[in-house]
Amino acid sequence: MNGIPAGEADAAATLLTNIGELTTNVGSDGDPCGTLRDAAVLLVGDRIAWVGPAADAPLDVRVVDAGGRAVIPGFVDSHTHLVFGGDRAEEFAARMAGQPYAAGGIRTTVAATRAATDDELRRRLAGFVAELHGQGTTTFEIKTGYGLTVDDEERLARLAAEVTPEVTFLGAHVVPAEYADRRDDYVDLVTGPMLRACAPHSRWIDVFCETGAFTPDETERILAAGIAHGLAPRLHGNQLGPGDGVRLAVEYAAASVDHCTYLTDDDIALLAESDTVATLLPGVEFSTRQPYPSARRLIDAGVTVAIASDCNPGSSFTSSMPLMIALAVREMGMTPAEAVWAATAGGARALRRDDVGVITPGARADLVLLDAPSRTHLAYRPGVPLVGTVWKSGSPL
Ligand code: NIG
Ligand code: FE
């Protein structure tokens, strides 16, 4: 019972004990994963109340025996686009037959999303949330960006806010077809009425800063307007080629710049000196056949790296964080421990959250019991369903 807060080891508590390998992410030098062996975690209400050696744990509470298996924090997926209608399976099949990925496909999903009712979108979203939970994701961000009218963007932000506090306004996803010849008017719409409609439902402002989407000047206008409305910046950058995304993200103190597929040495130096997380999205390279960026190069330069699914119907239609871990290890040069950290604590950093992604007293009780003796199995056994029981806010899902 050493170190257990008085009064917390009561009937409302659950002790998860006999954990062979516990990833706390409360790191020490040489082990950012803060690994404990033969450990136990006490959950009280929606919080973690105590973490320590199993031998010191209380016995007068409900006990869940982990049987020597591994426990990690719930995954934090800091980048998804989950409110949309339709799908683009044919586009995917054409790509696998040799067509390149082009951001123009976004417009196909915009048309299907506009045609869907709120209830259709809500039902689909509920299905995705169940899919995320089942795969161990307990915190997730959702972007708008498939509406691109004031009313459609507002409803996507509102529907996303029904399932997560991490909503990102991405009216600047692409210029919709009806504004193709007057893009300045579209930027006025995004920075004016659309932002005013979406800001009450949103925490973040994002722009797809890329050739074929929004220019650096437009990106600056949109980020500045979002910040003036109380939103915090994050950015899609350097996805389809080298560009100004990373530089702008750092200049605007964005929480994260996402994709980072094409980086120069200067981009990496800027990131290393900043608080901006580089969020890598290996599902995109997998599904578009682009080259994978090197996480190793970023980590060795001192950049904080997160990995996320980017789940969307075009460039990465998977919500599996275990798959992201396997790809980041196999294709991006991460160690299994780095990849698990990036999918949990890294995602939390990318969302500027300190209550998730860690297993420590006071944190939200979000945990995943793996059907495996170590977190390494997430990369070692790709495609195998290793996520066992998932607790979110102290309750098993
Ligand atoms: O993150 N890069 C921009 N947006 C999405 C792709 C969306 C789509 O193709 O529908 C992404 O990859
Ligand atoms: Fe994205």
Image (cartoon, rainbow, N blue to C red):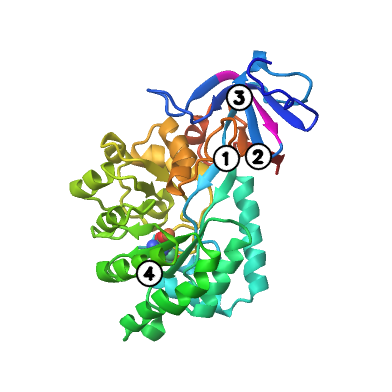
Residue 255 at least partly seen: yes
- Residue that numbered label 4 is attached to: 225
Q: What kind of element bears circle 4? A: helix
Q: In x, y percent, where is residue 196?
A: 48, 74
Q: What kind of element bears circle 1? A: loop
183 and 254: which one is in front? 254
Q: Amino acid at mark 4?
A: Ala
Q: Are marks 1 and 2 in contact (CB under 8 Å)?
A: yes
Q: Amino acid at mark 1?
A: Gly
Magenta span includes 38: yes
- Residue that numbered label 3 is attached to: 51
Magenta stretch prevailing secondary structure: strand
Is 300 placed above or below 221 here?
above
Badge nearest the viewer, 4 or 2: 4
Q: Quick one: label 4 or label 2, which is nearer the N terminus?
A: 4
Q: Quick one: label 3 or label 1, which is nearer the N terminus?
A: 3
Neighbourhood count class around disc 3 (C-alpha, 10 Å): few under 14, some 14–19, many 20 upward: many
Magenta range is 37-44
Q: Are marks 2 and 3 in contact (CB under 8 Å)?
A: no
Disc marking residue 390? 2
Q: In x, y percent, where is residue 129?
A: 62, 55
Residue beneath the point at 70% across and 33% down:
44
On the rendered image, what quadrant is the N terminus found in?
A: top right
Quarter of the image where one finds residue 174? bottom left
